[in-house]
Amino acid sequence: MEFHWVEEVLSYTRGLGDCKATSTFTPPSSVMPPPLPQPQGWNVLVSQSREFMRLFLSTTPKHLTFVNVQLWSFTSSLLCLSVNSFLNFEDGSKLKDQRLMAGAAIVLGDIMDQTQSEIISKVLAVNMEFNWHLVLLTTDLAMSESPFLAK
């Protein structure tokens, strides 16, 4: 699985803005870099990812063959929603997407425990980092907008 584009978005979320991947954390700054451009058809892909994740998560029981056949589409959908949380930060579907991503992380965590897959481990690590950056970003914005929480 190619992670180059994910690393570019991670670099953006780390506040570098130059799309050079790094493994160090940079706290959010008061000056936000310009938004990343959205690839053509991105919103359609995000919508399809949401629908696929809903279908996958609602299917019970999940037979091993079903999971094996759908796993990479499910994993890609998780990455798509994670990246979208920054490309469309003020999207009205943010809370629903967070629930879908949390459900997906649980499923992938169970699969990771069973398979020890490096790719699934990387996807979960990327998703966790996106979640932390999103928490830091929303906390930083909330503090800057509230006179009682100002620095």
Image (cartoon, helix red, strand yellow):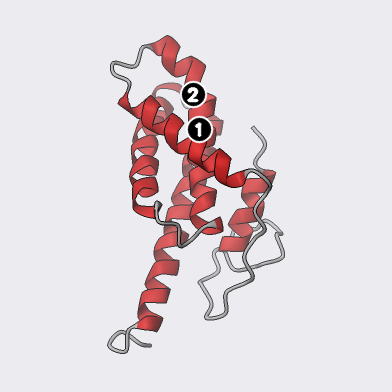
Residue beneath disc 1: 75
Side of 147 where 64 appears, left or right: right
Work out whether 21 lies above or below 101: below
Residue beneath disc 2: 71
Q: Which of 94 and 3 is in front in this view?
A: 94
Q: Where is residue 34 in the image (x, y as percent from the top left)?
A: 64, 70
Q: Is residue 110 among what the camera can see?
A: no
Residue shown at 31% from the left, 84% from the top: 149
Kind of residue indicated by mark 1: Thr
Q: Position of residue 140 (x, y in %)?
A: 42, 75
Circles 2 and 1 in contact, beta carbons < 8 Å: yes
Mark 1 residue crowding within 10 angstroms, few (<14) / some (14–19) / many (20+): some
Work out whether 147 lies above or below 55: below
Mark 2 residue crowding within 10 angstroms, few (<14) / some (14–19) / many (20+): some
Residue shown at 49% from the left, 24% from the top: 71
SS for tag 2? helix
Q: Quadrant of the N terminus?
A: top right
Residue shown at 37% from the left, 82% from the top: 145
Q: Quadrant of the C terminus?
A: bottom left
Q: Where is residue 61 in the image (x, y as percent from the top left)?
A: 29, 16
Mark 2 to mark 1 CA distance (whole Å): 6 Å
SS for tag 1? helix
Give the quarter of the image for residue 11: bottom right
Kind of residue indicated by mark 2: Leu
